[in-house]
Image (spheres, rainbow, N blue to C red):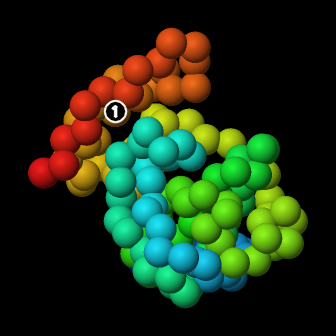
Amino acid sequence: MALRRHHIWSTLLVLGLSMPALAQLDTTRRATTVRAGPDAVFPQVNPLPMSANVHVFGCIPNRQWCDILSGRIRGWVRATDLSQSSRVRNAPTVTFSVADYWDAHYRTRAWFGSRDSWLAWGTPGFQPPAVVTR
């Protein structure tokens, strides 16, 4: 049993460490804001300075926003804020689900409590809720 548990933890550790390796490396071309989704209406996660190193996991189909990781900051930045436009064009295409993404990355954020109000994002007439910043 202990050996099996060790094997499971070892596998999870390897997968967790290799995830950024599967992403494409890039840098920010200007100071930018990481958002909680691929749209300027989403809450701000953190700012990033110019020349910040990022791992690009993929971009939404229109290539305007990309899912990134910089240090411990995970979220979405405008593709135009990344320096390697050719890499962005070749990055994997990813989809976005508020529920799945926020559940995986933002449970401790103050605005996570409004998660259900964001589920209709992308539908006609969607109005973003007021963002809690505390």
Residue 19 x/y as whole percent: 62, 73
Q: Nearer the viewer, residue 13 or 78?
A: 78
Q: Is residue 125 depicted above or below 73 in this figure?
A: above
Q: Residue at x 44, y 80 (%)?
A: 49
Residue 9 shows in this picture: no
Asked whether, in this view, residue 91 is left or right of residue 83, the answer is right
Q: Residue at x 43, y 49 (%)?
A: 36
- For label 1, the residue is 115
Q: Quadrant of residue 87?
A: bottom right
Q: Residue at x 35, y 23 (%)?
A: 117
Q: Is residue 64 depicted above or below 67 in this figure?
A: above
The amino acid type found where label 1 is placed reads: Arg
Residue 55 x/y as whole percent: 62, 76
Quarter of the N terminus within the rendering:
bottom left
Residue 11 x/y as whole percent: 58, 75
Q: Residue at x 78, y 44 (%)?
A: 61
Q: Quadrant of residue 105?
A: bottom left
Asked whether, in this view, residue 101 is left or right of residue 127, the answer is right
Q: Nearer the viewer, residue 46 or 15?
A: 46
Residue count near mark 1 (Cα–Cα under 10 Å), binned few <14, some 14–19, many ≥20: some
Q: Is residue 2 depicted above or below 81 in this figure?
A: below
